[in-house]
Amino acid sequence: MTNGFEAYLSSNSIPILCDGGNQFLVDEETNQIKALTENTKVSENGTWTNNTKLYLDQFIGQGEKYIGYRMLSYPSGEIIYCYGWIKIKLSANKDTLIILNRATNQTEFNNLLTGQIN
């Protein structure tokens, strides 16, 4: 979800990730967060959103999956994006959400594969 300059994911209205200027990679048909598999490229290609109502239903009981995101910054007055991923697991009954890992490519405008650490 987004709120002003903050973007966050939530489970049952409880924020679980907060970062200023984040956008999430979504399915262009549903406009909901895409459940990605390992070694999927996270880059400028794709549909990005500032949608204020994003749900994780597509992750329910699917095992370990990835969320693609990009961080927005304006270090010198120009828009800069850094791409990253969050690895999660959501139980079949939605009572347990585990954030397993997260990585961001700190090099401006460079892609990152889901699961890639270095």
Image: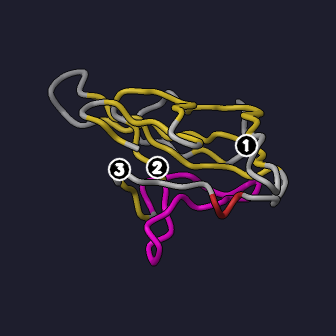
Q: Amino acid at mark 3?
A: Thr
Screen quadrant of the C terminus:
top right
Q: Position of residue 39 (x, y in %)?
A: 74, 54
> Circle 3: is it few (<14), some (14-19), or many (20+) Cα within 10 Å?
few
- Disc 2: which residue: 24
Start-end of magenta stretch: 25-45
The numbered mark, 2 or 3, whose residue comes first in the sequence reads 2
Q: Position of residue 32 (x, y in %)?
A: 49, 63
The numbered mark, 2 or 1, whose residue comes first in the sequence reads 2
> Circle 2: is it few (<14), some (14-19), or many (20+) Cα within 10 Å?
many
**Residue 95 in which image quadrant:** top right
Q: Position of residue 113 (x, y in %)?
A: 66, 48
The verdict on residue 37 being magenta is yes
Residue lying furthest top in this view?
75
- Disc 3: which residue: 52
Q: Secondary structure at mark 3?
A: loop
Q: As drawn, is 29 to the left or to the right of 35?
A: left
Above or below, comparing residue 41 to residue 14 in the picture? below
Q: Name which residue lies at 49% across and 52% down.
A: 43
* Mark linked to residue 65: none
Q: Main secondary structure of the magenta part?
A: loop
**Residue 97 in which image quadrant:** top right
Question: Along the line of sight, which residue is nearer the eye, 12 or 51?
Answer: 12
Q: Name which residue lies at 30% across and 29% down.
A: 73
Q: Amino acid at mark 1?
A: Ile
- Disc 1: which residue: 88
Q: Name which residue lies at 54% across and 33% down.
A: 14
Residue lying furthest left in this view?
77
